[in-house]
Amino acid sequence: MAAIEPLRALRYDLAVTDGLQNVVAPPYDVIDAAGRAELAARSPYNVVRIDLPEGEDKYAAAAAELASWRAEGAVVQDEIPALWALAQNYTGPDGRKRTRHGILARVRIEEYGPGRIRPHERTHPGPKEDRLRLTRAVRANLSPIFALFSDPEGAAWDALAGASGVEPWGEVTDADGTLNRLWRIRDEGAIEQVKAAVRDAELLIADGHHRYETARVYADEIGGEGPHRYVLMCLVALEDPGLTVFPTHRLVRGLRPDQHEALAKAIRRDFELEPLEDAGALEPSGDGDAVRIGYLDSLSERPYMLTLKDHAIADAALPGRAEPYRRLDTAVLEALILKGALGMTDEDIDDLAGLGYARDFAQALGLVQSGEYDAAFFMASTPVRRIQEVAAAGESMPPKSTYFFPKVPTGLVFNPLA
């Protein structure tokens, strides 16, 4: 059972910040040093200054910065609890225009389990420690966790449709061209309808696993009841027509001659090789049950489609794993190629030792054609139903198995924990 509540949000005073455009940022984990500098230069109140802080004691610096913003009136706290309706008009990597709808709320923190909250990807200890130290310092959720729930009738968003038909409270267009429009919903009847629509739903974390696990640890550290027992989420219906999942491609580099040989041997042993006339056909379809992976290396530059010869190969390579997990292309690639042929460990994969990721097809192609990487494996989009099946089986997918686009910006609203 998902317990959601409106929040007395910490938020920007748009009269002070001149709107949202120059103060929001992408999630911290997709911002590099140059991107941070550019965002920080936009405004003295840009959220990157506290969500990705710098300095000798960067966490204390973040806390001091947020306190300063509140003292100046750039960030204020609402007296009346509200839900926040978010509409994101975007053009996906596939070139199609869509609108995705989400609801920002605070959600009671639960242990993972059936009927409550489920993860779908593995996490790493490093980011969790960073986010925990930041949470202790600022005592607020700065960035929402992106979670999915089933709402076949669309009851939750319909409850907010009237309120979201008026001028939005704020809007911002991000670097990907996504128009984010945000409405504050204080109507108690609408809020109760949303709560009823979500009450019996199981929540599946789509993005923000590290932040959710950080929230659990922080809540237990503080102990007892209070606002720290809730975490900021953006809830999107699985049935929302704007919900899409795109692939994240894998790249490897620094291969020794023996690894090149082992890679070629494993591919010939376990996969059917189909030569492709055009590298543009390397991205496989996610339809069907066959495990298919596009392959290109910098030596031959000949594109191939790899199709797993028999599901029994994956079953043997992934003993003890649930059947839905064994049908994932990312899991099969990890077991047979990254770990099996190339000898990577979980630590190598977590630390990106010889491994890279690319969410853009053209970028992945260029990194191999330029010789910066030795080879690329082009993955298919994972259908939402398959993500649900893996989570329901109690499994967590390999890192970067899914790419939910667009991201939910950081800085729309904050959830106070004290």
Image (cartoon, rainbow, N blue to C red):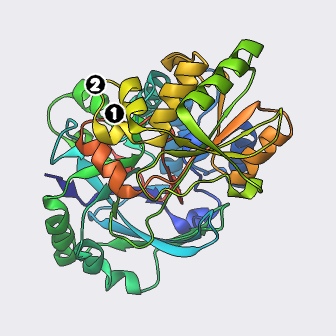
Q: Is the residue 333 above or below the residue 12 in the image?
A: above
Of residues 256 and 70, the one nearer the viewer is 256
Residue 337 falls left or right of residue 84: right
Q: Is the residue 83 above or below the residue 392 in the image?
A: below
Residue 196 falls left or right of residue 127: left
Specify the label residue 94 is tagged with: none
Label 2 SS = loop
Instruction: Tell me what residue is drawn at x 28 percent, y 33 percent.
Output: 216
Of residues 115 and 102, the one nearer the viewer is 115
Instruction: Tell me what residue is drawn at x 25 percent, y 36 percent.
Output: 394
Amino acid bearing label 1: Glu
Categorize mark 2 by other alpha carbons within 10 Å: few (<14), some (14-19), many (20+): few
Specify the label residue 213 is tagged with: 1
x, y percent for residue 367: 79, 40
Distance from disc 2 to disc 1, alpha carbons, whole Å, reads: 25 Å
Q: Is residue 60 visible?
A: no
Amino acid bearing label 2: Gly
Q: Name the residue under label 2.
A: 320
Q: Can residue 105 be seen in this view?
A: yes
x, y percent for residue 408: 49, 57
Residue 95 falls left or right of residue 130: right
Label 1 SS = helix
Quarter of the image for residue 174 reads bottom right
Q: In which quarter of the image is the C terminus?
A: top left
Outermost residue toward the right?
Answer: 370
